[in-house]
Amino acid sequence: MTSTADLLDPSSAAYKKARRQFYKATKNRPAVEQDWTPFRTAEKSFKARFPPPDLSGVLDLAQLDPSRQKEIERGVWKGSTEPFPYRRLEGCERSICVVPAVPGLVILPSYLSQEEQRQLVRWSLERQARGPNPTNLDIHYRVPNEGLWNAYIHQKTTGEEVTIVPKALDSDVVEEKSSGPRQLVDNAPASVETYESLAQTPKPPPAPSATVPPSSPSSLLYKLRWANIGWYYHWGTKQYDFSHGKGDIDRDLRHICKSAVEAVKWDQVYDATEDFDWGEDGNGWKDWGETYEPDAGIVNFYQTKDTLMAHVDRSEVCKTSPLVSVSLGNAGIFLIGGDTRDTEPVPILLRSGDVVIMSGPCRRAYHGVPRILEGTLPAHLKVGGEDWAPFAEYLETTRINVNVRQVFPKGFEAPS
């Protein structure tokens, strides 16, 4: 099996073979599109498999943490500690940084301890990716009530054959096979003024695919992509479906998110001269320590070849309050720019245990994840007792991202 280290070494046979294959494949390829936006250009550069992307312009704040040096040196991917301006907030108990080029973006490197990371991985797979929380697989399969992960562990430990049946077998409506590229949904921004009309928008349940075969938990596990948190998010319209009611936010996850928000000295992030138009939210940052209340979100399960294209989050009525994003497992490249794709994004390398907070102006900034960096699983997630072995095996090719939002402003009463 060819390693990433071999592909990065110009003297290796694997590098030379990949180079020959690359030039053969691109010999008759048309010239690079000239109308790519700066964001699209950045996405393409980091998605490239050969030659591997240059990370010298990627901010890698984990390198400033002496306790993580072995983790970083053990891997082949390394960014820079000073590719573009950033500053550390003063008087904080933890290392907290902001990037002037992206107002409202806050980075908390190494925020979660090793044990907290293991606990959150367990929570994501054992307790979150299961009923009554919807996942991407529930659309097409009749996943057991105990959830896919727990069914997988049962199969693995007992040897018992488990078959997960497609929903299409007994459904009157099935998904029609698309003949063209996936159509992007351009959803209307949510606000206090538009809430009522958005809440009344029809949100039919997605139709199951007629082509998926019966499968075992082990074969479906690596196709798990997301699980819902709190308010139900309708992917077809990219709006919340409040008719489902609000699911519970795990107490420990809520504590992590609120603690991260409370750890930030927001008066150093924003000040009285800030010219951003806060709209109906006002200068809400002054009270986030008291008013921030996470009530929705998504657990994303990325495999190493997955990407998240540039997009803007605009489904929440409360459009400036903190969005807290936690990274677990393999590292990823995070791009964030401005209010259009024409703004060149800044690239940040997020490792396991890092937390990012998007707030205020950057809540409406384009952002995405063009690359999961293979071979970056830290050693502390490869060991952890006998019952940790299945988690370690799964994490070898996986990045888990837990991102949590606040849908409604504090005190907002939805029209009945």
Image (cartoon, helix red, strand yellow):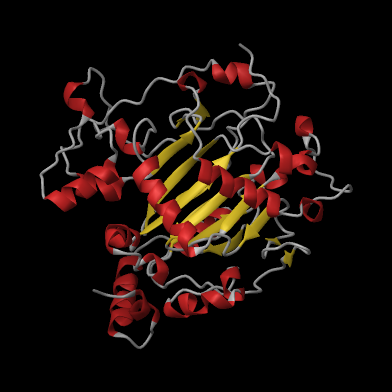
Is 284 left, or right, of 139 in this rendering?
Answer: right
Is 293 left, or right, of 5 in this rendering?
Answer: right
Q: Quadrant of residue 293?
A: top right
Question: Residue 174: image x %, image y %?
Answer: 25, 24
Question: Residue 407: image x %, image y %?
Answer: 60, 32
Residue 376 shows in the view: no
- Camera-side residue of 129 and 104: 129
Q: Is residue 310 above or below residue 30?
A: above
Q: Report the residue that reaches farthest toward the bottom.
A: 11
Q: Which residue is depicted at the point 70% across and 30% down?
A: 410
Q: Is residue 246 above or below residue 249?
A: above
Residue 287 shows in the view: yes
Question: Residue 213: image x %, image y %?
Answer: 16, 38
Quadrant location, the C terminus: top right
- Camera-side residue of 12 and 133: 133
Q: Which residue is depicted at the point 51% across and 39% down?
A: 297
Quadrant location, the N terminus: bottom left
Question: Residue 144: image x %, image y %?
Answer: 24, 34
Is 299 left, or right, of 147 in this rendering?
Answer: right
Is 320 left, or right, of 347 in this rendering?
Answer: right
